[in-house]
C-alpha cells in the first residue's frame, strides 16, 4: 500500500480543461511528495503514469488503442521538492485532463 509513513494515504484528484492558448509547462503542488502520478488526457484517451522507483523523466505511456510504451521524454516529472511538472507537450490546448497523485 502507499502511505505517508504514518498510515495515512495522501491522494488528490484534479480535473481541468485547457483553453486554446499555447500550452506551457505546468507545476502542481499537492502538499505531499507523490509515489504515484497518473496524468490522463480524457479527450484523446492518453495516460502518462509515473511510479516511485522509475527514473525521474520516465513514464508509462498508454494511448487510446491500448499500446503501452516507456516514454523517456520527461513528460511528467516528480521533482525533489515533491512538486510535479507536466511538460507543455502533454498539456495540449483545448483538452480535458485529470491528474491523480498518491503518496
Image (cartoon, rainbow, N blue to C red):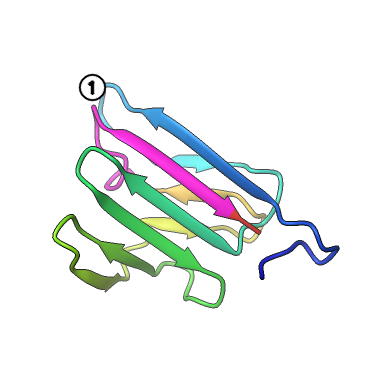
Image location (x, y in percent) of residue 76: 42, 56
Question: Taking 20 as reference, is 48 above or below it?
Answer: below
Q: Residues within 10 Å of mark 1 (few under 14, many from 20)?
A: few
Q: Is residue 97 inside the magenta stretch? A: yes
Looking at the image, the residue that sits furthest to the left is: 65
Q: Residue furthest top?
A: 20
Report how many numbered discs are placed on residues in the image.
1
User: Which of the 4 quarters of the picture holds residue 79?
Assistant: bottom right
Examine the rendered structure and indicate whether residue 38 appears above or below residue 35: above
Q: What span is in magenta?
A: 88-101
In the rendered structure, the answer to whether residue 72 lies left or right of residue 13 reads left
Q: Is residue 9 rendered to the left or right of residue 72?
A: right
Instruction: Say which residue appears at 24% left-offset and 31% top-offset.
Output: 93
Apparent side of residue 97 relative to residue 83 in the rendered image (left or right): left
Residue 33: image x %, image y %? 67, 56
Q: Position of residue 78 (x, y in %)?
A: 54, 59
At 42% from the left edge and 48% from the top edge, which residue is drawn? 86
Residue at 24% across, 70% down: 68
Q: Which residue is mark 1?
A: 20
Look at 23% across and 37% down and name the residue there: 43
Q: Closest to the observer: 42 or 52?
A: 42
Amino acid at each position: 500500500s502507499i502511505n505517508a509513513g504514518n498510515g495515512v494515504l495522501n491522494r488528490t484528484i484534479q480535473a481541468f480543461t485547457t483553453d486554446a492558448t499555447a500550452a506551457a509547462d505546468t507545476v502542481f503542488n499537492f502538499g505531499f511528495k507523490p509515489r504515484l502520478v497518473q496524468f490522463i488526457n480524457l479527450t484523446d484517451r492518453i495516460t502518462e503514469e509515473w511510479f516511485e522507483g522509475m527514473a525521474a523523466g520516465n513514464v508509462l505511456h498508454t494511448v487510446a488503442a491500448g499500446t503501452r510504451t516507456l516514454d523517456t521524454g520527461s513528460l511528467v516529472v516528480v521533482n525533489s521538492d515533491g512538486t510535479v511538472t507536466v511538460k507543455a507537450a502533454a498539456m495540449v490546448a483545448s483538452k480535458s485532463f485529470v491528474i491523480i497523485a498518491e503518496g
